[in-house]
Image (cartoon, grey):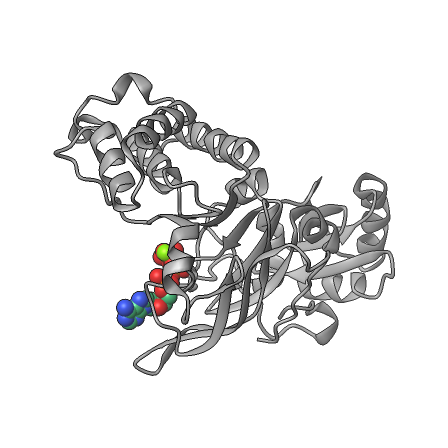
Amino acid sequence: MSAEIITTGDRILEIIKTNNLTKKFNGFTAVDHISFSVKKEEIFGFLGPNGAGKTTTIKMLTTLLHPTEGSAELSGFDILKERDKVRKHIGVVFQDPALDTELTGRENLDFHARMYGLDKENRKKRIAEVLKLVDLEEKKDVLVKKYSGGMKRRLEIARGLMHYPTVLFLDEPTLGLDAQTRRAIWEYIKKMNKEEKTTIFLTTHYMDEADYLCDRVGIIDRGKILVMDSTDNLKNAIGNDVITLSCSNLDELGKRLGEESWIKNVKQHNTFLTLGVKKGEEKIPIIFEIARNLNIKIKSISVRKPTLDDVFLYFTGRIMRDQEKKDAKIENLPPMLRSRGR
Ligand SMILES: Nc1ncnc2c1ncn2[C@@H]1O[C@H](COP(=O)(O)OP(=O)(O)OP(=O)(O)O)[C@@H](O)[C@H]1O
Ligand SMILES: [Mg+2]
């Protein structure tokens, strides 16, 4: 798969910078020469399916894993040569919960703050601040084993913020939580980014999460970054509207539509075509006309605004939800139907 990296914006305020960062496990390349940067105070999302290399990247950036190759800087400090300085500037919330459930919420925070050397007065002040930020003031003296999943996650986020990190890493912050709790966590993430000016580096395989939260996203698949840009730019790159249609002859209609200059891209899937266009509604009659001339019957057609799901599908050829390529396998396409990123 050819990778095309799109970057925009200035590079002056880069708080994370990687250069060919690579991790191999016994010959298997989990993270494959990735070079990217994260800007100060942005919410940056690393988006990718299971096994894409998201957690491995976070572990390298947070000095927990030694890269096989390449380098990275965080707040100007080298992740290999200045590990202690890097650690002082970061907070991490891991994918797997890591709280002491036999302690209360406040005790968990206090323990963490002591490890970072905060004095008594500062600990008290900071614990009150972070508990307020995630709405856990009333539960602070309850044992964590009695917390719900969402409350535990909020406490973990609060703990990650205790020592005023410049960058907070959140690995799948809402994995396994119900829709309402996920929404609440999104609000806390936005709030800490805004109020505390914390740069957020999050990983997710939820498109809606990345769409709602992130200023910019990088799509990672099989250890490689396929594309990186603002969510708006990525959506615009595939067309202002997405038309999805099914018909009696996908191959022929797809090929014919691929000749139309007003269509930004045509992509053929197992049972449908997607087209990236401007002013989708106005294009529907034209598409019907083209199909009629080819004696092709359109069975269904719809137009909508692109989502990050479309972006992911466009650049990886796969649907994020089922990574088995079931519904979206793109194979043996004529060249004009292949889009960039494939
Ligand atoms: N310690 C390890 N030893 C061997 N292989 C590993 C190790 N850690 C990760 N891997 C492999 O590296 C690849 C990337 O794993 P990683 O955990 O970074 O993926 P991820 O994008 O975080 O996935 P998920 O969405 O499931 O959390 C996977 O194929 C995984 O099996
Ligand atoms: Mg992971």
Q: Is residue 315 above or below residue 334?
A: above
How many numbered discs sit on the rendered protein? 0
Judge by depth and name the residue closer to the eye, 265 or 245: 265
| Residue 5 in picture, x, y percent from top left | 65, 67
Q: Residue furthest left?
A: 102
Dividing the image into four quarters, tell me where ligand 2 lies: bottom left
Task: Please name the residue shown 51% across and 54% down the image.
Answer: 47
| Residue 126 in picture, x, y percent from top left | 37, 30
In which quadrant of the rendered image does the C terminus lie? bottom right
Q: Is residue 76 above or below residue 108?
A: below
| Residue 150 in picture, x, y percent from top left | 32, 31
Residue 48 visible here: yes
| Residue 226 in picture, x, y percent from top left | 59, 66
* In this picture, residue 232 sits left or right of residue 217: right
Task: Please name the residue shown 33% across and 23% down the image.
Answer: 136
* In this picture, residue 284 sits left or right of residue 169: right
* In this picture, residue 204 sits left or right of residue 272: left
Q: Quadrant of residue 66?
A: bottom left
Residue 174 visible here: no
Q: Residue furthest bottom?
A: 27
Q: Is residue 337 above or below residue 104?
A: below
Judge by depth and name the residue closer to the eye, 61 or 124: 124
In which quadrant of the rendered image does the N terminus lie? bottom right
Task: Please name the residue shown 75% across and 67% down the image.
Answer: 255
